[in-house]
Image (cartoon, rainbow, N blue to C red):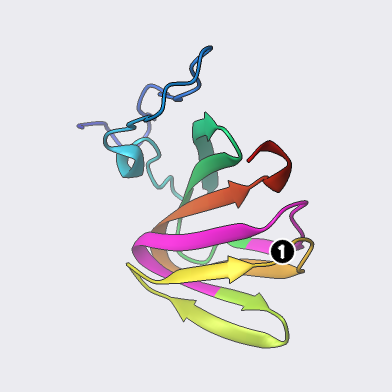
Amino acid sequence: MTSTPAEQPTPTVAEPAAEPGMIHVPGADELVLVQPESTVSRTVLKAEGVRVVVFGFDAGQVLTEHTAAMPVVLQTVRGHLRITADGRTVDLLPGDLLHLRTREPHAVEAVEPSILSLTMIDARRS
């Protein structure tokens, strides 16, 4: 996918009316581009019991401490993120996974321009 730094790719969200047994979202990691001095996000999948949001963080961007109403799994797709939760700080590198329980306070800092995949697990819809 080719885009100039100032433009975002056209959003593609897999959210079928009648949900099939398999949903494929090709190139989900390219649906968000890192923007200068910004944090951007896009929901790329909503399906039974799960929602996936892709974030783009420029270096130095921070999501201050917050919580999620459900368990989440974070995965760095590109870049280097620093996650603080449960009294610890973890460097999350490409391919690493991190699970946070429901309402676990956490913060995210981009050490360098990064793409993060956030998977929210809604047990009520499983």
Residue 97 x %, y %? 45, 69
Residue 88 x %, y %? 65, 87
Q: Foreground: 57 or 86?
A: 86
The residue identified by callout 1 is 64
Q: Is residue 110 visible?
A: no
- For image coordinates 27% across by 37% down, the residue present is 27
Indicate the quadrant where residue 94 lies. Answer: bottom left
Outermost residue, left side:
2
Q: Quadrant of the N terminus?
A: top left
Q: Is residue 120 left or right of residue 64?
A: left
Q: Is residue 82 visible?
A: yes
For residue 73: magenta? yes
Q: Is residue 121 left or right of residue 112?
A: right
Q: Foreground: 109 or 46?
A: 46
Callout 1 amino acid = Thr
Indicate the quadrant where residue 3 lies. Answer: top left
Residue range of the region highlighted in magenta in the rendering? 63-82
Residue 21, compared with residue 28, is above or below; it is above
Residue 6 x %, y %? 37, 33
